[in-house]
Each structure stands twice: as C-alpha cells, then as structure tokens.
Image (cartoon, rainbow, N blue to C red):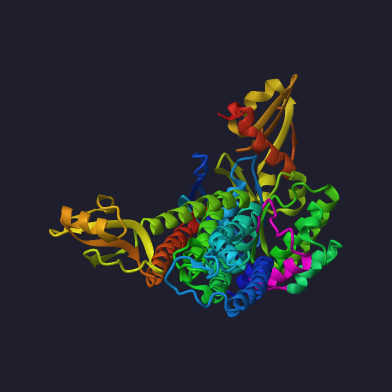
Amino acid sequence: MKGTLWLAWRQQRALAGCAAAVLLAAVALAAYFRAGMLDDLHSGVFDHCDPGPLYCSRPQDGLPQFLDVEPLKLLGALNMALPALVGMFWGAPLLGRDRELGTHRMVLSQGVGRAQWFASRFALAALGTVVLSGSLALLFRWWWEPAVNRSYGVFWYEATALTGSGPSLVAAALFGLSVGTLAGLLTRRVLSAAALTLLVTGAVAVLVQWTHRARLLVPPQRYVSAGWRPKEPMGDKWSTGHYGLITGSGRRDSVLECPYPSGRELRECMTGNGYVSRYYEANPAGDYWAFQWADTALLGGLALVLVLVTVLLLRRRV
Amino acid sequence: MTGPDEPAALHATDLGFRYRARGTWALRECGFTVPRGRITALVGRNGAGKSTLLHLAGGLLRPAHGEIRVLGTAPDGAAARTRVALLTQDKPLYPRFTVADTLRMGGKLNAAWDRAVAERVVREGGIAPSVRVGELSPGRRTRVALALALGKRPELLLLDEPLADLDPVVRGEIMATLMAEAAEREVSIVLSSHVLPDLEQTCDWVTLLRAGRVELNEDADALREGHLLLTGHADEEPALREHTVVHRRVHGRQLTALVRPRGPVGGAFHVERPGLEEILLGHLQGAAGGAKGAAA
C-alpha cells in the first residue's frame, strides 16, 4: 500500500498544491472582507434592525439598508461549483490519465494489484476532497455567522448558503469526485471524462435545487392563525408562496378568495364566505439542517453507489 | 534446472480469449507448455494473438476460456506479480516523471527491487537520471522500461515487441543488455518480435501463433533439425508427397520447398539445413500462400 500511495501522491501533489492555493486565497479574502463586514456592523448603522423584517430601512429616509455580502455570496457560488470542479480536475484524471497513457499496464505489471492501484489513489483524492470542501464550508459558515438570517445579510435558504455550506457540500464534492473517477474509467480519455463529469454534476445540481424549491425532501410546515388576527410574521422562515383560507369544515381555499391583507374588508369577506382562519406554508430556519442532512444522504449515497460501480467495473475494464 | 516437477514458465490449457468490441476470438483452443530457463521467441503475423497471449500471461487480461498459468501460479495473483515482469508493446511510462523518479517508483511498487540492476541498465544507455521520460528517444524509453522490468528481478520476463521502432544499433544494444542480465540469473524470457534475424541468435524455444492458435511450440534446435530446405526441378514435386510440406515456391522450373521429412528424402533435390529464420518465415507464409497442397 505504501508504494501505491507514494505514486498517488507523486501524481496528485500538483493538484493538492492547487487546492491548497485556492483554499489559502479564499481564507485571505474571507478574512479581509469579513473584517470589513464586522466594521460596518460595529459602526452602529444596523443596530436598530431587528431580525424580523425582510428589509432594514434607514431611519432618516426609509431606504433599504444592506450589508456588502456580495463577496460572501461569491464564495457560496464557488462552493456550489466545487463538485463539478473537483470532478473535472481531480476525478477525471484519477483513472482516466493512466487509461489514456496506458500506464496502468505498467503499474499493474509492477507488483501492484488493481484493487490497490485504485484504492490508494482514490483514498488520497477523497481525503483531499474532504479537506478542501470541508474547509470551504467552514470558511463560509465563519464569514456568514455575523449576517445569518439578518435582513441585511444572507438568509439560510438562499442557494449560496444552503448549498454552499454545511456537510452537504462535502457530500456533493465527494459525489463530483466519484462521477469524474467513473467517467475516466469508462471513457479512457481525460478530456471526455471531464466533459461528461461537467454534464452529470451540472444536471444533479439543478435537480438538487429543484428538490429544494419543491420542498420534496423537507416538507414545509403550515402556520395557521385564527380569524383575522395578524398572521405570525414570516421572519426568517422560507415561504413556499402558498397562502390560504380555511373554512369551518377544514377546507382550504386560495388566499385570492379574500385578497385583503387586514381590516374590515377582510373580516367581512371571511365571515361572508365561512372562513374561520388563515394559513401560510413555510420552512422554519431550523430546517436548514433538515435540508443539509437530506442532501448529504442523497449525494453521499449516490457517491457510494458510483464508487461501488467503479470497483465492480475495475476487473472488467482495466 | 528444468526438472519434471518444476512448474513450467507458461502453461496454457484450452486457452481462449475474445475482445468484446471485436467479437472474434483473438486466441482459441491454445494448449502448450513453455519450459523454464528458455528464451522463447513468440512469433506470429499481425493479429495472430501474440500481445493477447502476453497480456493474459501478465495478468492484464483474463481468459474467456480455459486457463494459463505462469510459474505454476495464476497470473493475476500476488505471487505471480512479484515473480513475473511484463513489458507491453507501447512501453507506457509517465512522461512527466524523470528517469530517477521512474526508477524510484519501481522501488516503491515492488516488494523486492534490485536498484543496482535497474540503474546499471539505464547507465549503460547513457541516460541522465534527471531527464524527463517524455523527452527521451524511443530507444532510451525502451531502455528505461526494460530497467523497470529487470529491476524486479523477475523469474519470468514477458516482452511484447521490445525491439519495434528501434534502429538496428539500439536493437543490438538492448538485446545485449537483456541477454547479459538473463544469463546472470537464469531468467526465463518470452519475447515476441517481428525481427526474425534477432531471434535466430538468441532464442532456444519457439512458439508460433497463427490466427489465434498455436502452430509450433518446440525447441529451436529440434526445429532446425526437423526441417529441410529442398531445391530441385519442378518435375520432382511428387517425391515430396511422403513429407509434410510447410511452404513451397515454384520459380520458373525451379521448386523450393521447406519440408518436415518423414523418412529419407527421395528425388533429385539439393538438400540444405535451413536457419531458424527460414523455418519461421516458411511457417508464417505457409497458410497465407495457400500452398500447403502438395503435402495433402
């Protein structure tokens, strides 16, 4: 095992160096911009903002106030692209380069078995992927912390935060790595493997975003308020956009039956049509972790399946 | 050294292999034994199955039918991996590794590694250790690949077209290195090549493949003694009927035939002992020319 690990390191050290450079640059930029963000927060401009309203406005003229969170969102976007990047640049050449050059024949005729050849290089790549994606996820979290779910900051359900942080990022990166590895084994060309990896990881990323929007894996909760009492504020909940009215018998109707926010008109409309309460559907902020674990299980499971397929194909294809 | 109990270098029983993409059998019903301690010429035309056979023996491919054993063990087992070295035709090496790195890799990947031998083979070619493999000429790359194979101190060395693409001088040098190392430690070598004259000097066993089947598998001297090259008038042809005609050629009124005599040769023929090259060439041409007729 030591010999193949040496070879794996010799072949992947350039990649590991690149990953370390990217990580260092991200840390430096994060430290710089986070310090600026903290300075803005400590200046007192945002002190009057409560977590509730979606927009915090300036007292003097009522204009909405925002913190500069664009660099943070950029890091989130990089994190979202990480599975494709890891798959294309680390996964695709992992077996694909040896297959393309034919060098696996040389390695395999040098006292090394297929399983060992694969296991050591995949283990090293997986370790690198976990360290890189885990560090970037933690970095995002650290930078995001002062602005979590603030009207002037970044809410937990924004894609850059929900997909760009947490354990699901590690699972997504491992998924990208395993897609690239299998693609390299199947196509025998690094370039085609990278293209295929981009296609697959892109499609899966879109699919994951769709499951978030559709609340497929984490169903929303229904918040009901009796009569025409003001509804519980949305706050940091992630609204599905479903608002409605409930009759005495429990039937739910669209909010458009009584399209009034409050007041006498609402009361008259509701009593006239027999509605006894109003509701809306949303995911509370605590669902961040439900989404995270659902994605982690989904992508981690897919990665596991792909590695299994790779191992099974190894004997037939190499 | 080659006692009856000692396992053979190669032993195939009803060996068959087909590539999925092509669908046809690359090797079929191959049963043969190559004894240990021999330098075997694996001969055959393009597509005869030489590379397939060597890849099967090296454990890179698995038989679709039958089995092949190397030094008495399965080719893809751990025991065979340490005792058998295979140099494939494309001589794959990492182009971005330096020569020194490549040899270091050999040391890391093999349980037993003779650094001195590997370095000597490289040094004899005048190759600087700091050069990247990708910048070497084909002959030098072959030498580095050979150093990697010899550094394993294999008991069986499988070489697939090691001399292709090399000029005659380099061919001679590499052959000399190979033979020197082989003689020092009684390595069994199986070597496929198109360069028949090179084989004449070095090989003492011949395995000839034709269209995926084994046609010859014999001691080289026995082959030389078992064949005759006859030259005579075309009218003498009926006298050949009692013998196995491997290849015959009629040029005007003159008949030249390579035969395996089955008894004394009659007729007015000029009789010569053919060289190994002529025998192999005759067998390779035999089927292609469709000229087996006289023997039947």
| Residue A116 position in % (x across, y down) | 54, 68
Q: Which residues are magenta?
A: B85-114
Instruction: Report whether residue B269 is seen.
Output: no
Residue B252 is situated, as x and y percent measured from the top left of the image, at 75, 19
**B94 is higher (above) or lower (below) than B275:** below
Q: Is residue A30 left or right of residue B118?
A: left
Q: Establish if B251 lies above or below A180.
A: above
Q: Nearer the viewer, residue A67 or B56?
A: A67
Q: Residue at x 43, y 60 (%)?
A: A302
State which quadrant residue A19 falls in. Answer: bottom right
- Between B186 and B77, the residue placed more toward the observer is B77
Is residue B81 covered in magenta?
no
| Looking at the image, residue B240 lies above or below residue B155 | above
Residue at 42% in and 68% down = A292
- Give residue A10's position: percent from left, percent from top: 68, 69
Relative to A169, is A228 on the left or the right? left
Q: Quadrant of residue B216?
A: top right
x and y percent of residue B133 in the render? 77, 59
Q: Quadrant of residue B262?
A: top right
Residue A229 visible from this viewpoint:
yes
Which image quadrant: the N terminus of chain A? Answer: bottom right
Task: Give whichever of B57, B23 is nearer the camera.
Answer: B23
Seen in the image, is B287 located left or right of residue B181?
left
Quarter holding the C terminus of chain A?
bottom right
User: How many callouts does the rendering have?
Assistant: 0
**Left or right: B96 as drawn, with respect to A246:** right
